Amino acid sequence: MPGRQPGLTNESAGHLAEAAPSSRGATRSQVDAAIRSGLLTGRFIPGKAVTIRGLAGELGVSPMPVREVLQRLSAENALEVKRNGRVQVPDMTRDRFEEVLTARLLLEPELAERALPHLTLQDVKTLTALDDDIDQRIVGGDAEAYMRLNHAFHFHIYRASASKVLLPLIDSLWLQFAPFMRTVYGRVGTASLVDQHKEAIRAIELKDSAALRAAISGDIADGMGLLGKEILESATAG
């Protein structure tokens, strides 16, 4: 297998292969799942390029399905595909950050409210277990596991809505901001994260839509909003 590509995080070398299909006859959907997982857990560094051939080698497939998946992700603004075949996560600018943050604050509380009637006590148990695991990862400073579990927590709620419109939009937003937030956690750590998940779980138990909206909004504003703005402002000042 080829060496680590320059756009992958150091601690994630070879992790794409773990999520990769086991044979070269892998379907495009398997390649899509592996690359999306890499984006959502911050295995790609904004502004650092990788090659289609290199990613294909990491995944153990031919370049063709990788190229098709990357073109689709490029259409979702999650990746940029260059003419020379190199691929990168776009750099996060202040304007882009503000747009993504605003979109999340508009769409995610709405989708959570739509999901609320479909969430059961079993969902509460699942979300509680996820949140307990998240707490351990925050204390342990495992940023990549935190991102994976945080995504699982939010999308367990959102998928209950069975939305055909809002859910794909929110999925695209997460692909766009996750790599940047991974670099943020790499700089400031996870100890400063504020957890609004318990408030969300309590709201689901009580079937309190206003409280659920507030918890989701607060989680986005505290997690992405405060930390992301701090890093962007410090970078601009520097």
Image (cartoon, rainbow, N blue to C red):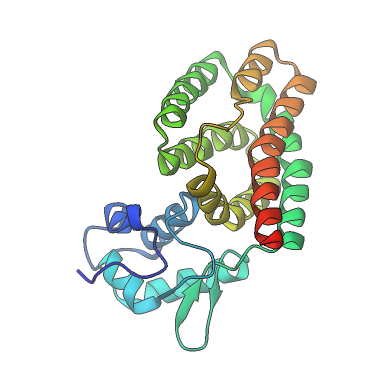
- Image location of residue 96, percent across then percent down: 72, 61
- Image location of residue 158, percent across then percent down: 62, 36
86 lies above or below 36: below
- Image location of residue 95, percent across then percent down: 77, 62
Identify the residue at the far bottom of this view. 84
In this orientation, does residue 114 appear?
A: no
Relative depth, front residue between 58 and 179: 179
Position of 20 with respect to 77 (left or right) is left
Q: Residue at x 60, y 19 (%)?
A: 198
- Image location of residue 147, percent across then percent down: 49, 41
Relative depth, front residue between 87 and 107: 87
Identify the residue at the far top of this view. 206
Q: Residue at x 47, y 88 (%)?
A: 84
User: Which quadrant: the C terminus?
Assistant: bottom right
Position of 96 with respect to 44 (left or right) is right
Relative depth, front residue between 162 and 167: 167
Q: Residue at x 60, y 67 (%)?
A: 91
